[in-house]
Image (spheres, grey):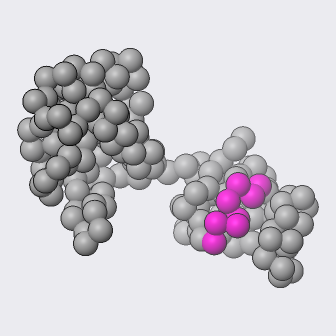
Amino acid sequence: MRVLLKEGAESATSDSILVLPQLTGSTLETLAGDEVPKGLAAEVDEKAVVSAVNTAARARSDEYVGAKDLMRDVRWLHKALGEYQDGSKIGLTPTPRGFTLDDSEATRIDRAANLAEGDTIAVGPSIKPKTYLNARGKVASVTRDKVEVVLDPGDRDRLARATAKPIAERLHLPRACVEKVS
């Protein structure tokens, strides 16, 4: 499971795993409740995370924050951290409606690394509009920031039905939006 750990932490414990602020505050906090400005993305065994969450929930003297609330935040961060490499430094930026991740010091995973002509790709979750999500095709050419893709006929038909517009056989997609399948 992908989590944020306190800088310098060796293992996943209730004092090192970070979550969103529970009641007040604008910075990350450990499961135990200590404020921390930024954390490092890391892959941790799910059993260790669940154990740390349960330990922290029992240790907190707050009747409004339980294991369920802490685990919900850990899962939200797990999904949000899926695009970042291990060791990326991530913080929080308050917004009028909540928080966004401050990824100014983070490194995204390059899912299109070593992409070459003839490779099969799938369109990833960062594409807009979302109609193109999971469309598959073969790479026709690769430039610095763009990939020319020949769409599979079935996906091309699906996109044409979904958008009610004719879809070209070849699309130019941003490199960051494609993932190498094989």
Image coordinates for residue 10, horizontal then vertical, percent:
19, 23
Which portion, as a residue range, is magenta? 129-136
Image coordinates for residue 21, horizontal then vertical, percent:
19, 48
Whether 160 is drawn above or below 99: the answer is: below
Q: Is residue 83 left or right of residue 7?
A: right
Q: Is residue 109 left or right of residue 92?
A: right
Q: Is residue 175 left or right of residue 170?
A: left
Taking depth in this image into account, of 95 and 22 the one nearest to the observer is 22
Please give the name of the residue rendered at 89% of the width and 66% of the height, measured from the top-left corner: 157
Q: Is residue 6 visible?
A: no
Indicate the quadrant where residue 30 lies. Answer: top left
Image coordinates for residue 107, horizontal then vertical, percent:
35, 52
Work out which residue is located at the far front of the displayed protein and give it.
Answer: 63
Whether the magenta-drawn stretch holds residue 157 is answered as no
Taking depth in this image into account, of 148 and 16 the one nearest to the observer is 16
Whether 55 is drawn above or below 92: the answer is: above
Indicate the quadrant where residue 61 lies. Answer: top left
Q: Is residue 138 left or right of residue 180?
A: right
Image coordinates for residue 16, horizontal then vertical, percent:
18, 30
Please give the name of the residue rendered at 72% of the width and 41% of the height, measured from the top-left corner: 182
Whether 87 is drawn above or below 167: the answer is: above
Please give the name of the residue rendered at 55% of the width and 49% of the height, measured from the top-left corner: 111
Taking depth in this image into account, of 44 and 70 the one nearest to the observer is 70
Whether 62 is drawn above or below 146: the answer is: above
Whether the magenta-drawn stretch holds residue 130 is answered as yes
So how many labels did they put on this image?
Answer: 0
